[in-house]
Image: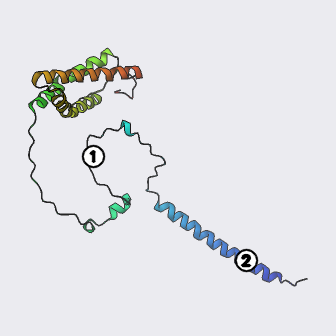
Amino acid sequence: MHYYNWNDYLQQMRNHLNTQEKRIQELEKRVLEFEESNKNQTIVEKLEYNFDQLKIERLDGTLHIGLSPEELSSMDPSAVQLPHNPIVPFREKQVDPLIQTLNTYASQELPNRIQQLSQDYQVSVNDHLEKEIIEDIRKQFPSRLDYYKREHQLSGDTLFQTLKQEVDHSLQQFFIQEAERGGNDDEFGGS
């Protein structure tokens, strides 16, 4: 048998227990510090991209790769050296008179046509949605105008009437789809 001193054993256990308690306190402190430092961060669990449904009219801004918003806000602006580009004066682009005519049509006739189609297909449309539809149509005028000039050699009143018919047809298709979808819901143009 080995002779073992109980007092020594208890002292060793007490020392070990004290060491473990200090270690637990340090770990708890580190966890609290970590939680505090991560309080303001946004966690995104899952991102799904449907590129077939994406329509980008204009893309601008600055992309900072590898920087978090906190790092960006604390970054010294003088640390970034930007190349010196001379300012080129903006030259106003000549607006096609047909675009002006189409914009007038969009402002004066489209709101009534949208309301008429809204009633015909029993799909409610609020003012905000009506403005979005008209604005989206306006943005497409230049590209559609170029298409018909280039591909069909149309011009003047024939081109204007063709674009009006296309807009009307597109609006009708939109309202048909919304009516089939149940476009009278509050989430679609509700007040």
The residue furthest top is: 120
Residue situated in front as seen by the camera: 29 or 133: 133
The residue at 29%/29% (across/down) is 129
Residue situated in front as seen by the camera: 168 or 25: 168
The residue at 12%/57% (across/down) is 87
- Quadrant hosting residue 160: top left
Determine contact: label 1, label 2, CB under 8 Å. no
Dot 1 or dot 2: first in sequence order is 2
- Disc 1 is placed on an element classified as loop
Instruction: Judge the density around disc 1: few (<14), some (14-19), many (≥20) Cα neighbours within 10 Å.
Output: few
The numbered disc on residue 59 is 1
The numbered disc on residue 14 is 2
Left or right of 63: which side holds 110?
Answer: left
- Disc 2 is placed on an element classified as helix
Instruction: Name the kind of residue labelled 1 in the image.
Output: Leu
Instruction: Name the kind of residue labelled 2 in the image.
Output: Arg
Instruction: Residue 125: give x, y in percent of width and height.
Output: 31, 24
The residue at 34%/61% (across/down) is 72
